[in-house]
Amino acid sequence: MIFSLLQLVNKSKKILLADDDSDFLEVTQIMFLDEGYDIVSAVDGEDAVVKYGDISPDIVFLDIKMPGMDGFEAFFRMIKMDPDARIFFMSSYTIDDEKFKKARNLKLRGLITKPFEFEDIEKRIQKHAK
């Protein structure tokens, strides 16, 4: 019964996940779905910005390094659309300190280093999602 209630609470959380690595995107999306979250995926920054406008997610996880529009540019556009956007960067690379500082000043919620434990993501969802 408690598990069912938790799944109902999770289903109300809309998550946008953007990453150009199709394998990572698929596996992570399955993990979110298994936990009962409403998940929408995007394959690059431009796709993420469009989907953000369409679905108004409760929380966003953005890869930084993506072809075309990277995660930084997608972040800045989403924040311009919605100053209360709840966005985390995900990366396995070193990041541009200047852009990262600017993003932090605009309420970036944090950086998740890949690979990560799914429980860490869930804690962030519970703490930061709208």
Image (cartoon, rainbow, N blue to C red):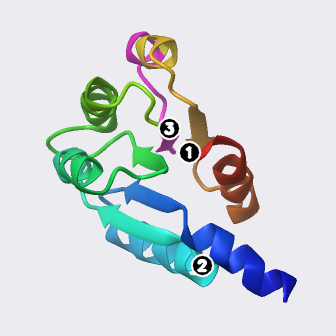
- Residue found at x 60% / y 83%: 34
Q: Along the polypeptide, which appears first: circle 1 or circle 2?
A: 2
Q: In which quadrant of the rendered view does residue 83 lie?
A: top left
Q: How many marks?
A: 3
Disc nearer the start of the sequence (3/1): 3
Task: Return the x and y of residue 127 as percentages of the image width and height.
Answer: 71, 44
Q: Is residue 22 left or right of residue 28?
A: left
Residue at numbered disc 2: 36
Query: Any mark on residue 130, and which?
Result: 1
Left or right, residue 34 beside residue 99: right
Q: What residue is drawn where x is 63% and y is 69%?
A: 10
Nearest to the eye among marks 1 and 2: give it.
Answer: 1
Q: Nearer the viewer, residue 59 or 2?
A: 2
Q: Amino acid at mark 2?
A: Gly
The CA distance from mark 3 to mark 2 is: 19 Å
Classify 10 Å Cα crowding around label 3: few (below 14), some (14-19), many (20 and above).
many
Residue at image coords 17%, 46%: 46
- How far is the residue under mark 3 from the one under mark 1? 7 Å
The magenta segment is 86-100
Q: Amino acid at mark 3?
A: Arg
Q: Which residue is mark 3?
A: 86
Left or right, 37 with respect to 50, comes to right
Of badges 3 and 1, nearer the viewer stands 1
Q: Residue at x 18, y 39 (%)?
A: 69
Above or below residue 59? Residue 31 is below
Three-letter amino acid code at the position of disc 1: Lys
Q: For this rendering, which residue is in front, 116 or 124?
A: 124
